[in-house]
Image (cartoon, helix red, strand yellow):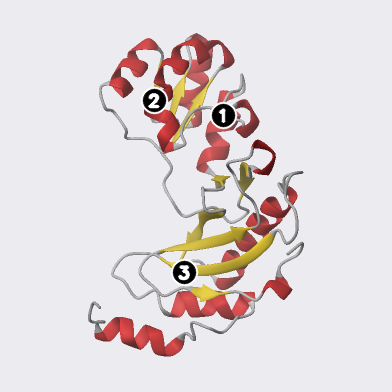
Amino acid sequence: MAKQTKKRQAQGETVDREKLYGVDEAIALVKQNATAKFDETVELAMNLGVDPRHADQMVRGVVSLPKGTGKDVRVAVFARGDKADEATKAGAEVVGAEDLMQEMQDGRSDFDRVIATPDMMGVVGRLGKVLGPKGLMPNPKLGTVTPNVGEAVKAAKSGQVEFRVEKAGIVHAGIGKASFPEADIRANFDAFIDAIVKAKPTGAKGKFVKKVALTSSMGPGVKVALEEIPGA
């Protein structure tokens, strides 16, 4: 067993790994233990009562966090002509068509979100093996295949977060930075929880939200009491 650092031991003394904390207390503990030399991301993880191997139990969607993520999101857009200009004006870092497809096939990956106009999906479709495993493939249901590329770029940069449940029934996302005020983290927490509960699939049986935990990039996990989670 790896030896704990003094810092990790000190963090462990402030958090009871078995206790279920109220949301506000959990947020305060996460901020208290975010002592790295960089602005740590506050991460929310949820264990859901679903088996995503079944199509009717998939949990996937997008949510706009009211206080933003604190992250500089780089956006790539597949578009031509006026739509390409619209994407550039909205702040997209990378805009292109077949040329961009070739760059991605050659390994370019300096982006966090990929958006495409509907007419470009014939080109983007060739990148399934490149973008699919990274969860970056544009999808109409997520608003990343749209004629309104300018709005989509602005949404991606202003705090929109995509979520997708993993094989073990876990969904997680960054909901802000440790430097955020506690009230801002709470607002983002509530928005993300609400989006997950509303995305409950028809095939989900029994208890939907099983566990919720908060942590920072380098800090200990803090379990959250489900009594404060609507729909849990």
Secondary element under disc 1, as helix, strand or loop, is loop
Of mark 1 and mark 3, the one earlier in the sequence is 1
In three-dimensional space, the C-alpha distance between marks 1 and 3, rounded to whole angstroms, equals 29 Å
Q: Position of residue 77 (x, y in %)?
A: 46, 24
Residue 19 drawn above or below residue 196 = below
Q: Which residue is mark 2?
A: 129
| Amino acid type, mark 2 | Lys
Residue at the spot x=57%, y=31% of the render? 152
Front disc: 1 or 3: 3
Horizontal relation, residue 104 to residue 62: left or right: left
Secondary element under disc 2, as helix, strand or loop, is helix
Secondary element under disc 3, as helix, strand or loop, is strand
Q: Quadrant of the C terminus?
A: bottom right
In three-dimensional space, the C-alpha distance between marks 1 and 2, rounded to whole angstroms, equals 18 Å
Q: Is residue 49 visible?
A: yes
Tags 1 and 3 touching, CB below 8 Å: no
Q: Position of residue 221 (x, y in %)?
A: 46, 73
Q: Which residue is mark 1?
A: 144
Q: Which residue is mark 3?
A: 215
Tags 1 and 2 touching, CB below 8 Å: no
Tags 3 and 2 touching, CB below 8 Å: no
Give the number of the disc on residue 177.
none
